[in-house]
Image (cartoon, rainbow, N blue to C red):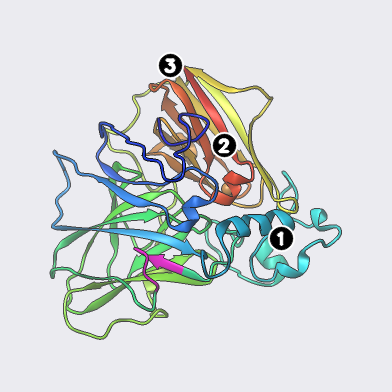
Amino acid sequence: MDGVPGLTQQPIAPGAAFVYEFTAPDPGTYFYHPHTGTQLDTGLYAPLIVEDPAEAGRYDREITLMLDDWIDGIGGSPDEVLERLQGGGSEMEGMEGMEGMEGMEDMPGMGTGQAAEVTMGAATGARTSEGPLGDDTGDVDYPLYVVNGRPPTDPPVFDVGLGEQVRLRLVNAGSDTPFRVAVRGSDLTVVATDGFPVSPTRTDAILLGMGERYDAVVTIDAEGVFPLVAEAESKGGRALAVLRTGAGPLPGPEVDVPELRGRLLGPEDLSATAETSLPAGRPDRTYELALTGDMAAYRWGIEVVGGGELSVQQGERVRLVLDNRTSMWHPIHLHGTTFQVLAPGGVAGPRKDTVIVPASGRVAIEFIADNPGRWALHCHNIYHAEAGMQTVLTVAP
Ligand SMILES: [Cu+2]
């Protein structure tokens, strides 16, 4: 069971206790959180780090950073946020006046399955960027972004040694916010994502969708105080942490980190290691799944193209083609098994459990259906999932 109420277990009643006992087969960076309503957005999560007894990579220190978008208790509860979204579309700045506006469904980017000629940000004259996720990166205008529960005005500070190899375990525990992470003055070497090793790859910045994890090694060769910024992609806010090798005043929330605008890994840049790659082969079964959305009604969906259930036999090699027919990106997360991303050109990408599907984009993933059961497949934007972007993968024994 994996904590999905109604699918693999009953919900844990208020005041009740439930004991999970499990073997941790795969080392890596994970986190655990409820799968009920909008509870994730109340901060109900924690990291789960599985150390590798045969760790191949060398590092001197590890730091776990939980990135989150925060509104609970400041801008209403997450349940109220969902109600507002379902009552009147996006919460983002510049959207308020559009509530109930006639003809909204005719606006570019607002309907289902139509090409977005103008993104929401451009349409409202707000929030422009040229990032890979476009301008419309979220539905909720969060008042605060945090690292390990702390605001950028009071960031967590980590003392690290000069020249040490520091393994950052980055977790996007947010509900509606992708984060772009960089450290001032250093590049990052990505060594794993979603728990699984990748061929070590250098970059300046890392973009994490909700639910995604990245492990990156950073080495600081100068004495001083170095900001690690997690920018809320195209949202105009940020979270902050500090790596300290020597004396110096702490950076303020607006500190400039040029690396945020440097190299950013794309899906074609990461590849699985030989150990984590699926064996060569062709899929026994392929499903095409449409990601659909109606922003005006705030309904989201994930459905098998051509109809029917998403059902496979244990042992089959399965390919899922995720066809995003909305003008917004979605981080799609599969329970029960992990998959390999097929990067553009059919290249074997990283092994993951959550993958970003860009607006109007297509992403193919493959997995061996080795875990019989009924497993959730959903958008890790908690508001999208609650508004319908979730389905079930059945692996029949
Ligand atoms: Cu989504």
Extreme residue in the right direction: 102
CA gap between label 2 and label 1 equals 23 Å
Element marked by disc 2:
strand
Extreme residue in the front direction: 15
Residue 312: x and y, percent?
51, 19
Crowd tier of the residue under label 2, counting other residues whose Cα lies within 10 Å: few below 14, some 14–19, many 20 or above: many
Q: Is residue 42 above or below residue 36?
A: below
Residue 385: x and y, percent?
57, 44
| Identity, as a three-letter code, of the amino acid under mark 2 | Leu
Asked whether, in this view, residue 245 is left or right of residue 273, the answer is left
Q: Is residue 211 above or below residue 17?
A: below
Q: Can you tell which mark lies on residue 314?
A: 3
Q: Are marks 3 and 1 in contact (CB under 8 Å)?
A: no
Q: Can residue 284 be seen from the camera position used here?
A: no
Residue 201: x and y, percent?
30, 51
Which one is earlier in the sequence, the residue at label 3 or at label 1?
1
Asked whether, in this view, residue 197 is left or right of residue 312, the answer is left
| Quarter of the figure with the C terminus | top left
Residue underneath mark 2: 322
Magenta stretch in the rendered image? 145-151
Residue underneath mark 1: 118
| Identity, as a three-letter code, of the amino acid under mark 3 | Gln
Residue 148 among magenta residues: yes
CA gap between label 2 and label 3 equals 21 Å
Element marked by disc 3:
loop
Q: Is residue 206 above or below residue 323?
A: below
Between 57 and 200, the residue placed more toward the observer is 57
Q: Residue at x 56, y 61 (%)?
A: 77
Which one is earlier in the sequence, the residue at label 2 or at label 3?
3
Write down the quadrant of residue 302 in the picture.
Answer: top right
Element marked by disc 1:
loop
Q: Residue at x 46, y 29 (%)?
A: 8
